[in-house]
Image (cartoon, grey):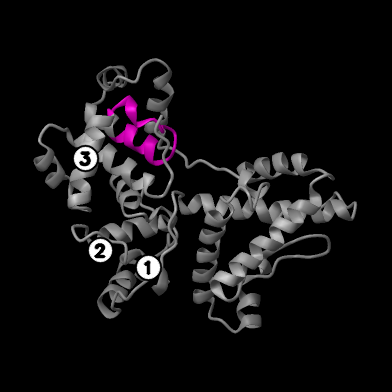
Amino acid sequence: MKELILKALSMKHENKTHKSIYNILIGKKTHQTYFDASIEHLKLYYGCLPNLKYNDFEMIVEQEPIKNQNPIVGNFFYQQAIQTVGTILLLIQMISQRKHEHFSYQPIINDKTIQFKAKELYISINNHHEEEFIKEVNQLFEDIDHYFSGIYVHYLLAGYRETPYTTEQISQIEEIPIIELKERLVEEYQLIQITIQNQERYPILSQIKFQPKLHQQTLSTYQLLNQTYDIEQLAIMKNVKTHTIHDHIIEMYIKGYLTDMNKYIDDIKYSKFVKVFEDKPNQNLKYYYETLGEFTYFEIKLMYVCFAMEGLNATRRT
């Protein structure tokens, strides 16, 4: 827990509060927290400690110096990492059972979304790509083991006549406190999510894609985009304030439902923002609003988010 907190804190912008980092770690479902996680490159820490108590968080902030950390960053939320690892574990189980012609078993993952993705890949792997899949899994575990000088996620594997170990069992075998083990597994999940994006090295595993869920109200706005992208029109259609639509639009970009920034920002405006940002990075919105003068807060927030994600090679401008 402590290491995850310190790594997240090491990415905090000076103008941001410690509470904002806490909100990211517990996965607070607000547009402000999505925004903070994006611009501070902390999406992979969003919701990784859902049961963290604020008093415990404060104790670590007050007692532990924020030394040089090495956080794992990427344009993915931690929930996506959970889904990705779940899909890999379920695929391993399915292929192991098939190799032994045993088709009556209890899946280790009950999540329907993960099951659907695993079945989809299972069909495509079939008998022709089974060995390639096994090779990729072995390579993945070697990569994780090399990065951390050890690995624990392999204890979660299940297959023919094999069941996964519990955290208590792993703790006893490896002589590691349970809280440290859980923290380490979070980091292994994060790294797996990033590692398999290498399509040349992982042509099969890189096909595992999940998209974060939108807020219900954001989803209803997204569904209206087939009629219009005009913010004023959307606000009228939903009978809400325009700033509510602004929040919805930015959430869509953050979660990958929209990628073309030019729907709302032209290249000239974006270039101006980037120049000011690079001169003085990671300032609050008010600074950029006052410095640029001609831009709205919505435009600045959107450009800030897109610039942060471009830094992770995540956005696509068309």
Q: What amino acid does circle 3 point to?
A: Phe
Q: Residue, x 60% and y 84% (percent of image)? A: 175
Q: Which residues are magenta?
A: 247-266
Q: Is any atom of residue 121 visible in this view?
A: yes
Q: What amino acid does circle 2 point to?
A: His
Q: Which secondary structure lies at badge 1?
A: helix
Tell me residue 262's x, y (percent). 33, 27
| Structural distance between the alpha carbons of marks 2 and 3 | 27 Å
Residue designated by label 2: 18
Q: Which secondary structure lies at badge 2?
A: helix
Residue designated by label 1: 7
Q: What amino acid does circle 1 point to?
A: Lys
- 33 drawn magenta: no
Return the mark for residue 107. none
| Structural distance between the alpha carbons of marks 3 and 1 | 28 Å
In primary-sequence order, the first of circles 2 and 3 is 2
Of 101 and 286, the residue lying toward us: 286
- 263 drawn magenta: yes
Q: Is any atom of residue 106 visible in this view?
A: no
Q: Residue, x 31% and y 46% (percent of image)? A: 35
Image-based side of 294 in relation to 90, left or right: left
Tell me residue 84's x, y (percent). 59, 51
Residue 199 against residue 295 in the figure, above or below: below
Tell me residue 318's x, y (percent). 41, 29
Residue designated by label 3: 273
Residue 310 against residue 106 in the figure, above or below: above
